[in-house]
Image (cartoon, rainbow, N blue to C red):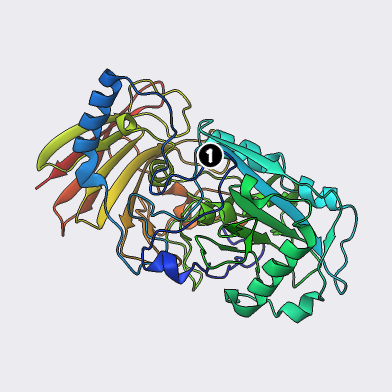
């Protein structure tokens, strides 16, 4: 189905040179709870028995922890490198609403805040199964007026950090530091008045700078993980009130180290199966690979099909909050940098747009930069036109999941993934054959 409006294309998100070279960085930290570099796992006491299970799980999963490559921007490799915000536990998000003399805020600043909250908090709670508790904090209930006009910062689509954003961040600090202890926050959200810059239907300015250790400092910490949200990302379908907030969890996904899955030329390699691909139109969740990356799936919920021969796995729906001893993700490594992920997607949780439940299969490549297509969904029904009738959802891939009796094959690597059975609870049995 044709979209009601052209697809909204977004700028490539910028990360610091330090992240690209893999150096350890200092991130904005939560008061009394410093960031643990290189780990997204929730902390807590671990018994000796649990530790033994954990060690066994990690040994079995090691072949599936495909590694990132130095120089790749926001690689899909595991683990996420240090410098990004942690993604489990209580996350305090400093949220500021700003305006300018040439673009004064229209209406109360609180209205701008309420375009994103509590919806963003609920979205993360659902997607993370309660493992990320998102706490937005706004010390200023009014617009924070910047000292320069918006035009003076020279911000346009894809603008680099220097000099415009650096100047803007310095001015934000100068206007707020007397009332804000920046050490108390894990990330920063800047909600710009929507009348600054063009409509999102024309171009999207929203951007995140993550892991930027060279960012201006306040209270001894750099504003290293900061998301800027500009005009309302209204897709024209009339659903903005319910779904327009999702540009913020998308941008915050970069703060947690996730790449853009859409391609810079407007290609749809993932479609609506991950909010890092499409964050407009109907609600959608994250891929299981990203949930593992963020520490929202445990090792016992992952199956690593690395051995030659045949293995069978029962997969619970990814949205299931309590899956018991059932897995939620099977990974089939191909090389040290690539592999196939297998998961079950249903119309539940954050996945409002699912029109064909089933087994989603996609290739992950840790050697591919953000915005260049690091993930590619396998389409079970190529050139079908899809099954969704929701506006501004990538229709062709909406019927991508595989059903009982269907198979996916990669002849180059001698891999076949077959869906052999679906039970009455929506679990799927899949078989992986490797030559």
Please tell me whether residue 334 is drawn above or below residue 422 in the rendered image: below
Quadrant in the picture for the N terminus? bottom right
**Along the line of sight, the residue nearer the viewer: 134 or 356:** 134
The secondary element bearing badge 1 is classed as loop
**Percent x, y of residue 198:** 74, 72
Q: Locate residue 424: give its quadrant.
A: top left
Q: Residues within 10 Å of mark 1 (few under 14, many from 20)?
A: few
Q: Is residue 248 left or right of residue 112?
A: left
Q: Residue at x 20, y 30 (%)?
A: 56
Q: Is residue 227 left or right of residue 149?
A: left
The residue where tag 1 is placed is 33
**Along the line of sight, the residue nearer the viewer: 152 or 307:** 152
Q: Residue at x 72, y 62 (%)?
A: 173
Q: Is residue 112 left or right of residue 271?
A: right
Q: Locate residue 5: give its quadrant.
A: bottom right
Q: Is residue 287 left or right of residue 394?
A: left
Please tell me whether residue 75 is drawn above or below residue 78 in the rendered image: below
Please tell me whether residue 169 is drawn above or below residue 47 in the rendered image: below
**Percent x, y of residue 152:** 76, 81
Please tell me whether residue 124 is drawn above or below residue 223 in the rendered image: above
Q: Residue at x 15, y 56 (%)?
A: 413
Residue 227 shows in this picture = yes
């Amino acid at each position: 189905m044709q979209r009601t409006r052209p697809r909204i294309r977004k700028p490539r998100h910028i990360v610091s040179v330090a992240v690209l070279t893999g150096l350890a960085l200092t991130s904005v930290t939560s008061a009394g709870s410093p960031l643990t570099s290189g780990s997204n796992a929730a902390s807590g006491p671990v018994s000796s028995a649990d530790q033994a299970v954990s060690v066994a799980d990690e040994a079995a999963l090691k072949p599936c922890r495909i590694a990132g490559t130095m120089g790749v921007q926001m690689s899909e490799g595991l683990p996420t490198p240090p410098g990004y915000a942690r993604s489990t536990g209580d996350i305090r998000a400093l949220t500021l609403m700003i305006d300018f003399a040439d673009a004064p805020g229209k209406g109360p600043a609180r209205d701008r805040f309420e375009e994103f909250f509590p919806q963003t908090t609920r979205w993360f709670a659902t997607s993370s199964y309660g493992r990320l508790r998102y706490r937005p904090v706004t010390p200023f209930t009014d617009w924070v007026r910047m000292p320069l006009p918006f035009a003076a910062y020279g911000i346009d689509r894809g603008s680099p950090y220097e000099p415009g954003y650096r100047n803007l961040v310095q001015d934000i600090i100068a206007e707020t530091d007397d009332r804000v202890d920046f050490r108390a926050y894990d990330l920063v959200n800047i909600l710009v008045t929507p009348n600054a810059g063009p409509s999102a239907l024309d171009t999207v300015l929203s951007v995140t700078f993550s892991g930027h250790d060279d960012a201006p400092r306040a209270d001894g910490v750099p504003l290293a993980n900061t998301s800027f949200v500009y005009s309302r990302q209204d897709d024209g379908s009339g659903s903005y009130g319910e779904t327009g907030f999702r540009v913020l969890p998308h941008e915050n996904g970069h703060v947690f180290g996730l790449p853009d899955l859409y391609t810079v030329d407007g290609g749809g390699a993932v479609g609506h199966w991950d909010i890092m691909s499409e964050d407009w139109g109907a609600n959608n969740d994250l891929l299981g690979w990203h949930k593992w990356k963020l520490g929202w799936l445990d090792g016992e919920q992952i199956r690593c099909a690395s051995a030659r021969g045949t293995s069978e796995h029962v997969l619970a729906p990814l949205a299931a909050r309590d899956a018991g001893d059932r897995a939620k993700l099977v990974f089939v490594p191909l090389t040290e940098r690539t592999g196939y992920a297998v998961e079950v997607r249903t119309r539940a949780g954050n996945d409002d747009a699912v029109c064909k439940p089933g087994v989603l299969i996609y290739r992950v490549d840790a050697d591919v930069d953000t915005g260049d297509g690091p993930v590619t969904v396998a389409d079970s029904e190529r050139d079908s036109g899809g099954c969704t009738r929701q506006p501004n959802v990538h229709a062709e891939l909406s019927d991508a999941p595989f059903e009982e009796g269907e198979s996916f094959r990669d002849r180059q690597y001698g891999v076949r993934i077959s869906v052999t059975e679906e039970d009455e609870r929506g679990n799927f049995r899949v078989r992986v054959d490797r030559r």
